[in-house]
Image (tube, grey):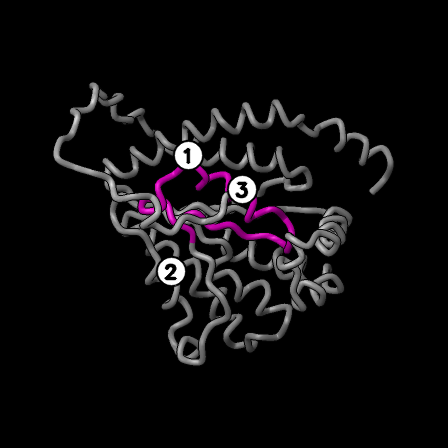
Amino acid sequence: MSGRHKNEKEKRRLTGKVYEAELRKLQVELVKLQEWIKQRGKRVVVIFEGRDAAGKGGVITRITQRLNPRICRVVALGIPTEREKTQWYFQRYVQHLPAGGEMVLFDRSWYNRAGVERVMGFATEEQYLEFLRSCPQFERMLVRSGITLIKYWFSISDEEQERRFQARNLDPVKRWKLSPMDMESRDKWVEYSKAKDVMFSHTDIKQAPWYVVDADVKRKARLNCIHHLLSLFPYEDLTPPPFDLRPRKKGKGYIRPPITDQTFIPEIY
């Protein structure tokens, strides 16, 4: 990255105070969206894809931070089991689709086949080509059934990805995010780029287009993504009014057991 381009990126970074204030506003709107989805019985699927360390998990965390996990849930599937490998490819994802009044966020999705599986050789050529043919049909079917399908691709430069890899490696609470697969992907930047371009050419459909998020600056990416997500819905503020919390009635006839009869954890702090 050139010095000029790097300086432009730096200028665009948000201060913590501004970021937190804007995030708070957006999270209030997300709560309104949640209530609208619940009361209107909507079914929403949001897919988050992108390169390793692009920031998908960070935006998902900020979206769900204030929401009810019974209404908005995250699906992050691991390696398929031997049984799942024999199923119709989309089968293990279908079981996680939302019912009425729910929103599901896929932290990676069926697009694994067009990305990781393609580049790392985990899928055969026949399986890969079949995915490119059937995925648009599958997604159109979901949309026709009444599901709102939203797809985000987090775009990150190779320099920024490497910087984040190095930072994760030095931080004991983030090192778990690195895997042997990540190490291999570092040397396959071009292969992943080509796979992404082919994937877009087949699956960037009118019924479910790809939305690209510039993810080089984490805070901006989070706010921009959440703001865009909210803009896609004609939601109303259906938040219930505050309850009338009158003074509690005093109970009678109850004596609390002695504290010595209970096992309290040590008060270290």
Q: Which residue is mark 3?
A: 59
- Using the rendered view, name the quadrant where residue 38 is placed: top left
Q: Which residue is mark 2?
A: 138
Q: Position of residue 199 (x, y in %)?
A: 56, 58
Q: Position of residue 235 (x, y in %)?
A: 33, 29
Q: Which residue does the image show at 35% across and 33% down from the upper left?
A: 33
Circle number at residue 232 = 1
Question: Which is closer to the viewer, label 2 or label 3?
Answer: 3
- The image shows a total of numbered marks equal to 3
Question: Which is closer to the viewer, label 2 or label 1?
Answer: 1
Q: Position of residue 221 (x, y in %)?
A: 60, 37
Give whichever of 2, 37 is nearer the camera. Answer: 37
Locate the N terminus and report the quarter of the image it occupies. top right
Q: Amino acid at mark 3?
A: Val
Q: Is residue 118 magenta?
A: no
Query: Compared to 243, does 194 lie above or below?
Result: below
Marks 1 and 3, how far apart in space? Answer: 17 Å
Q: Residues within 10 Å of mark 3 (few under 14, many from 20)?
A: some
**Circles 1 and 3 in contact, beta carbons < 8 Å:** no
Marks 2 and 3, how far apart in space? Answer: 26 Å
| Disc 3, SS | helix
Question: Which is closer to the viewer, label 1 or label 3?
Answer: 3
Q: Position of residue 98 (x, y in %)?
A: 31, 52
| Disc 1, SS | loop
Instruction: State the extent of the magenta-drawn residues as a range.
Output: 46-74
Q: Which residue does the image show at 35% across and 41% down from the upper left?
A: 68
